[in-house]
């Protein structure tokens, strides 16, 4: 692995940007897959960097008003798992691009071999060496710069509000801390793709949470939008509107509900007011995605001299009755407890060397607190303080990619002993494969029992095959049973109390869940297919063509009938009509070498609606190889102005990817309507519109058909 170190010149003292590059493509990843990815360069996954720095500085001040000083040290970390991936980095400062095929000046396009339109670190002064601007697989990019407060939009930086899109799933992590007191008052959170966003979130903790040891005395939810004019509500009361890449910060009590009229992401920031350092960040999944079985890999009942145990807070959203929650540790030990109606309850400390499974017959939410007392009188600490949300069982996979995995504050080779580790627990006995540089070849393996907690560091005295740079960024972790079948794992990265100490300036007081690397992902795009009035924009009477792209980002080929695609009849057909016999299915759309691409017509239904993708949807009729894409296309005609629903100004289309009957990946498009100048700006209405006028969409309406050259 080659390591390059660069420094950003700006009006304040800056940290550095590290780009790690693995120049070879390894034997475990086929060259056919590499060429397949290179032939499919449009974005299939979108992320927004959450938690804007100006609002974060307000939070830092609330926790440590005496000593928290700007600028804010901002970290955006990305890991690239495969060769041939394109990444579109869209800075917020000149507005989020409506369409990545027509990027604005600040937008960077990485991986296309064109140094003129961007590469990692291009905006630095002086700019970095482009090095061909092609990803070979296994790169980790840690973008770290200091953000002045107040924020000057004329200075383009890597920071909160930026949009990141990629042609293949990547790992993205967000972190930050103020210049003073530094990384002792720090936080980090995994960044979820827009496919995981939602429109209703329940606060599982809050400023009124009982028996929290003041850990949640300050609790805010940071809400960020992907679309213009997104309205946010707290318990039904409007909190105003925000645009793409903007966030609003809402102080909450336990059980309060935040909703929105368009999908948003939500992150919890909680801490003890007036403490020096106690602060924890959590990503929050939509309430509808909560489950009844969760896993955590972080087990520590003793910590550093007994000062850093980990417990789990479980929240029961049922306001009518309590629920019983069972817990299980390594070796089958465990027990159960009752969570009162509409309240939370804390578990016992998780034993050393053990992960944990929490389950109930009812849905709930769970998150960890590390650095808490291991006794009856619950207190929370501020030396090893971090936490992470537990992962619902139905969202786990057998693979995880580490976005940001520093062992110490300064990055690789900054210390001889990592303070932060990667924690892994399998749901069943498994071999854990560790690929330290993410090049596709496992460097070492570990045998693990079900619910055993494995702590992984990049140190050769602990793991043979490690690179010994105390940095797990970009590492790929996966698990298999003895027969080679996949075994699901829960993964986190964070500070290990046993490796840290009080006042340790080399320790990052933070950690995150590592989201499971998906096996299959779904994305939807739209484009104007028939401009019937010739005005060049999407307007009443025109035709739209939708494309649903299914990508196999796993490690194995998948057979026919693996997944189901459902495109919901509503809301799209409320204001459009289906174009008969327009559905097509393309297998091998990625162009796997040696294969043929088949475009197959899908017959209309003879019962119910004619549209074949609604109701039960359709199964994939052909195998989908690793790295391959399959496409589903169909057309709709937008109704004329007199036919449109009163007040509508956007055509919304939603659907879901299902595997074995479980919803795995939602997809959505929102196309603003433009009306002729002689017509009103939206369909006539006798009452206020339920959907605010959005103007030009801030999300791309279609994928680029080839590499941009701008």
Image: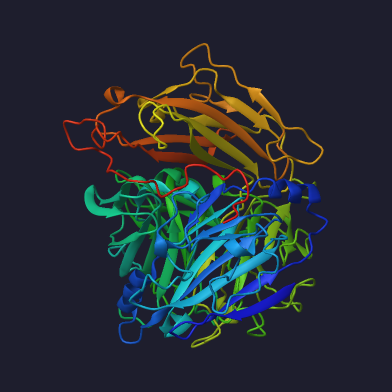
Q: Which of 11 and 542 is in front in this view?
A: 542
Where 656 sits versus 17, above or below? above
Task: Please give the name of the residue rendered at 19% of the width and 38% of the height, measured from the top-left corner.
Answer: 688
Task: Please give the name of the residue rendered at 37% of the width and 70% of the height, measured from the top-left corner.
Answer: 153
Name the quarter where the C terminus is drawn. Answer: bottom right
Q: Nearer the viewer, residue 280 or 585?
A: 585
Residue 392 visible in this rendered orientation of the protein = no
Where 55 sits versus 634, above or below? below
The way the protein has been coloured in the rendering is rainbow
- Left or right of residue 465, residue 469 in this image: left
Q: Which of 517 and 82 is in front in this view?
A: 82
Residue 466 percent location from the top left of the image? 75, 72
How many marks do you count on the picture? 0
Name the quarter where the N terminus is drawn. Answer: bottom right
- Left or right of residue 227, residue 690 in this image: left
Residue 107 visible in this rendered orientation of the protein = yes
């Amino acid at each position: 692995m080659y390591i390059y170190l660069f420094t950003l010149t700006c009006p304040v003292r800056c940290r550095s940007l590290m780009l790690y590059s693995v120049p070879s493509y390894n034997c475990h990843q086929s060259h056919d897959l590499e060429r397949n990815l290179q032939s499919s360069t449009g974005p299939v996954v979108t992320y927004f960097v959450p938690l804007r720095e100006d609002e974060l500085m307000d939070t830092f001040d609330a926790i440590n008003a005496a000593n928290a000083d700007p600028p804010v040290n901002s970290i955006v970390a990305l890991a690239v798992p495969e060769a041939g991936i394109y990444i579109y980095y869209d800075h917020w400062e000149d507005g989020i691009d409506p369409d990545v095929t027509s990027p604005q000046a600040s937008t960077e396009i990485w991986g296309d071999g064109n140094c003129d339109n961007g590469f990692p670190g291009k905006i630095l002064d002086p700019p970095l060496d482009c090095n061909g601007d092609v990803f070979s697989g296994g790169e980790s990019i840690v973008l770290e710069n200091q953000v002045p407060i107040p924020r000057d939009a004329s200075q383009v930086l890597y920071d909160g509000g930026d949009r990141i899109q990629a042609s293949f799933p990547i790992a993205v992590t967000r972190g930050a801390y103020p210049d003073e007191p530094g990384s002792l008052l720090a936080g980090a959170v995994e960044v979820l793709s827009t496919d995981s966003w939602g429109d209703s979130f329940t606060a599982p903790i809050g400023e009124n949470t009982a028996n929290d040891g003041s850990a949640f005395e300050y609790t805010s939810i940071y809400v960020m939008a992907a679309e213009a004019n997104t309205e946010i509500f707290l318990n039904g009361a409007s909190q105003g509107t925000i645009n793409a890449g903007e966030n609003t910060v809402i102080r909450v009590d336990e059980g309060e509900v935040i909703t929105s009229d368009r999908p948003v992401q939500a992150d919890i920031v909680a801490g003890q007011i007036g403490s020096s350092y106690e602060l924890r960040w959590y990503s929050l999944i939509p309430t509808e995605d909560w489950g009844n079985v969760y896993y955590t890999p972080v087990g520590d009942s003793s910590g550093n001299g007994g000062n850093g145990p980990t417990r789990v807070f479980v929240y029961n959203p049922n306001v009518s009755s309590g629920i019983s929650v069972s817990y299980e540790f390594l070796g089958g030990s465990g027990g159960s407890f009752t969570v009162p109606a509409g309240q939370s309850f804390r578990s016992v400390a998780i034993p050393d060397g053990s992960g944990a499974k929490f389950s109930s017959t009812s849905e709930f939410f769970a998150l960890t607190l590390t650095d808490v007392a291991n006794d009856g009188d619950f207190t929370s600490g501020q030396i090893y303080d971090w936490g992470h949300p537990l992962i619902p069982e139905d969202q786990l996979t057998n693979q995880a990619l580490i976005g940001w995995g520093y062992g110490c504050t300064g990055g690789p080779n900054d210390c001889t002993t990592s303070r932060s580790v990667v924690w892994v627990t399998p749901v069943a006995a498994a071999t854990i494969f560790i690929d330290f540089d993410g090049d596709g070849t496992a460097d070492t393996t570990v045998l693990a029992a079900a619910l055993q907690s494995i702590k992984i560091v990049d140190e050769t005295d602990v793991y043979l095959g490690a690179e010994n740079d105390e940095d797990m960024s970009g590492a790929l972790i996966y698990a298999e049973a003895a027969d080679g079948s996949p075994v699901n794992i829960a993964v986190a990265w964070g500070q290990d109390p046993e490796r840290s100490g009080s006042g340790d300036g080399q320790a990052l007081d933070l950690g995150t869940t590592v989201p499971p690397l998906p096996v299959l992902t779904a994305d939807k795009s739209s484009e104007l297919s028939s401009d019937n009035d010739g005005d060049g924009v999407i307007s009443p009477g025109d035709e739209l063509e939708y494309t649903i792209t299914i990508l196999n980002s796993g490690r194995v080929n998948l057979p026919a009938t693996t997944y189901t695609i459902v495109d919901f009849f509503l809301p799209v057909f409320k204001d459009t009509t289906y174009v008969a016999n327009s559905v097509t299915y393309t297998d091998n759309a990625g162009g796997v070498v040696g294969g043929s691409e088949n475009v197959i017509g899908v017959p209309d239904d003879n019962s119910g609606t004619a549209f074949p993708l609604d109701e039960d949807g359709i199964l994939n009729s052909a195998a989908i190889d690793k790295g391959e894409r399959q496409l589903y296309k169909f057309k709709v005609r937008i109704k004329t102005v007199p036919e449109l629903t009163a007040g509508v100004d956007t055509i919304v289309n939603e659907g879901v990817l299902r595997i074995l009957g479980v919803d795995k990946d939602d997809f959505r498009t929102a196309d603003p309507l433009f009306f002729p100048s002689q017509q009103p700006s939206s369909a006539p209405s006798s009452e206020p519109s339920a959907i605010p006028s959005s103007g030009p969409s801030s999300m791309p309406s279609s994928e680029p058909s080839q590499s941009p050259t701008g």
